[in-house]
Amino acid sequence: MTAQLQPDEPMAAHVSWRAGGHARQAIHPADRHSLAAFLAGLPAREPVLFVGLGSNLLIRDGGYRGTVILMHNTRGQIRCEKSLIFADAGVACPKLARYAAGHGFAGSEFLAGIPGTVGGALEMNAGCYGSETWDVVSRVETIDRRGKFHQRFPDDYEISYRQCRRRTQSTALDEAEQTEEWFTGAWFSFPPGDVTAARARIRDLLVQRVATQPLNLPNAGSVFRNPPGDFAARLIESCGLKGLTVGGAQVSTKHANFIVNPGGAGSAADIETLINTVRRIVRERTGVDLHPEVRILGEALQ
């Protein structure tokens, strides 16, 4: 199977902020074989961006001068393999959480609070409620620019809070042979659990999430990483920044570490300016430099 290449694709349709420019081209692969064939045929220097639900991403208003691979797949595979669960990168994390809970595993419940796909969660070591994605990863599958699949293990990566980087090889020859890789799936290891208890825990976490986060408005989840020993939301609120606006973008009045874009009225520039403004004010007033966990890519509008 093949998928149609879409030129000049509006990325506001693929990021949860509902803002930003166009990609030069985009494709939603029909399956793993079409993805491999497509990557193998791309020019070696073509910029490539893999996007799941776009819940941790902002494309500037001038757009992305490269190829976007749209990975979210509502029919993505999830399956039990003995004591492990395999999930495609395009599977939404809440779907994985429900599947694991329904098949008698514990420890997946936190994934229900991650508003992204498995691939995105692996890329940024997403987490909430005291757990992180790589805490439960047994191994992963990746694909490189040549369309070749690989299996990698946690020891192949440098994993930390909201970060995951593949370890570099030690020799110049090895480094020269390395190529970009992207996650296409993962095997997760969860301990046995009680189905009823796990499902109840997921329900409780979702109720908590609805009560504390502005889920009814376009947002990208937490904007800033929590600094050591503190919370970004507390620092932002302590500076009186709840409700601060730039253009159509606003610091949420419900959760200070969220920036919302009511009605999609704000531009990517509005959102980025508000991020920088919040960061500057918090740094000036508290001495803490907040670091964004959202990715901001592309060109500014000229």
Image (tube, rainbow, N blue to C red):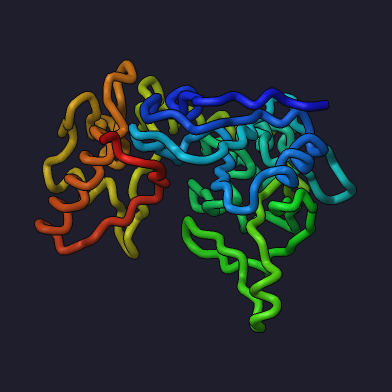
Q: How many marks?
A: 0
Question: Image check: 16 left or right of 142?
Answer: left
| Residue 29 drawn above or below residue 290 | above
| Residue 133 drawn above or below residue 79 | below
Residue visible at 48% across and 32% down in the picture: 23
| Residue 176 drawn above or below residue 14 | below
Examine the rendering and report whether any part of residue 249 can be seen. yes
Find residue 259 and report its horizontal and vertical position in percent: 29, 34
- Splitting the image into 4 quarters, where does residue 16 fall? top left
Residue visible at 70% across and 76% down in the picture: 174
**Who is closer to the viewer here, 187 or 166?**
166
Quarter of the C terminus within the rendering: top left
Find residue 125 and report its horizontal and vertical position in percent: 54, 54
Which residue is the extreme one toward the right? 82
Question: Image check: 231 left or right of 274?
Answer: right
Question: Image check: 215 left or right of 174?
Answer: left
Which residue is the extreme one toward the top? 263
Residue visible at 77% across and 43% down in the picture: 36
Find residue 294 and report its horizontal and vertical position in percent: 40, 46
